[in-house]
Amino acid sequence: MGLMKLSKLFPGVPEAYRGVEVRGLAWDSRRVRPGDLFFALPGGRYDGHDFIPQAVRRGAAAVVGERPLAGLPIPYVRVENARRALAQAAAAFYGHPTRRLTTIGVTGTNGKTTVVHLLGQLLPGCETLTTVRVEEEGLSCVTTPEAPDLHRIAACALEQGKRYFAFEASSIGLAQYRVDGVRLSCAVFTGLSRDHLDFHGTMENYLSAKLRLFEMLPPAGWAVANVEDPQADRALAASQGRPLTYGIGHGDVRAEEVQAEGFGTRFLLVTPGGKAEISLPFPGRHNLLNALAAAAVAWALGISPQKIAHRLSKASLPPGRCERFKAEKGPEVIVDYAHSPDALKAMLEALRPLARRLVVVFGAAGESDRGKRPLMGEVVGKLADFAVITSDNPKSEDPQAIAGEIAQGLGEGGYEIELDRKRAIRLALAAAGPGDIVLIAGKGHERFQLTQNGRKPHSDRTFLLSQGLTPLA
């Protein structure tokens, strides 16, 4: 982007500031470049106002913040909410790209990445922004990046001639106004189960954050909701858009005559515009619901049931989602991102009928919702034959203490604790044989462990390859 007048981003600035030119937007003082507009964002651990001097030294053209400040050598714009101001400024700085794209936001505890990934395969010329991409490109935040990254990616998609833009809208991203300034054509609600209560405090607060996506939807947009979730009505009621539900056996877009076929699912897709048979190349009720969510959006945007069926039959899952490996003369191994009680349950229920014995390697993240740890243990204890509790991004917490909280849910079930994740995977592989399935849950596509000693390289997928396992299509 070129230079932009500060008055274009903040029309109400004093006359003396109106000619100030902004080269870019920054919210991390360490990454300020000369000419950037720096936003002093308040946070849980740090307050951006404390880093204004560093931003000034690095050449910021102006500063936006919430506190009353005086004596700065550069213009200062005081706002009521710096995060919301950043989002609105980012939309304007990049030319409001989501107004010219058909933009789809997907929210829900589980399934966001898969639904967005499938939309990229169902909609021609669709740019996607997923948790996987955020990590691969080193973007800000987890799942939903800060607004300048979001609008920059949308603007690049527009320049490349893309027609659609699908992105994950996390509850934290919505609560922090990162999605403000986006013009939506569709909002998707995949469902709600326990997660992120360390941030939101209560399930009601968690739901309210997700409902913000639906509150943003204009009357001409589509509000798409999983009719099987108890909160679907709340999502639809929060929106002025046209309602569209999906589900298995019921909903506007639904799956009928569902039959499991090994690691796939055959079903009849029923839409208000017709029917089509689909052979989905991945297993599980949860993945069928994810496929239906994507199909509902595609139908709402004018894709025929026949084209949806053809494209879904050839679709793939995102990296680290139900990714299959095979050990020679040994078990099949599945790498999956499941890291909440509900996601673990869905994955284990999908694999249970396919396995002679089901072995699970899993842990729980540090500095996160502690209450879900024994719940995860309880799910694994009920559905798996043997478990290895290990580390999964313990961050500043003691990995042994996290494992102990998980083990409370497992009770007297068969399990071991091995905090070294590589040794834990080896232990699980040694405990399994032909006809068994080993699920390595929690990290999926991730390439690092976050520990007390910083970020350590680790990939479950890469480690399996180093152990001689072969990826399966």
Image (cartoon, grey):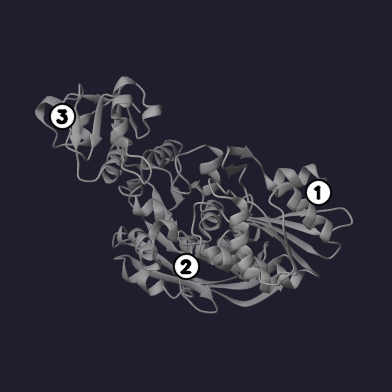
Q: Quadrant of residue 456?
A: top right
Q: Nearer the viewer, residue 155 or 338?
A: 338
Q: Amino acid at mark 3?
A: Ala
Q: Is residue 6 above or below residue 294?
A: above
Which corner quadrant holds the N terminus? top left
The residue carrying pointer 3 sits among few (fewer than 14), some (14 to 19) or many (20 or more) residues within 10 Å by Cα, namely few
Q: Amino acid at mark 1?
A: Leu
Q: Quadrant of residue 159?
A: top left
Task: Kindly report which numbered mark, 1 or 3, lies closer to the viewer in this rendering.
Answer: 3
**CA distance separating discs 1 and 3:** 62 Å
The residue carrying pointer 2 sits among few (fewer than 14), some (14 to 19) or many (20 or more) residues within 10 Å by Cα, namely many
Q: What's the mark number on residue 469?
A: 1
Q: Amino acid at mark 2?
A: Gly
Q: Which label's residue is closer to the chain start, 2 or 3? A: 3
Single out the residue that lies furthest toward the right. Answer: 329
- Can see residue 291? no
State the residue position of label 2. Answer: 191
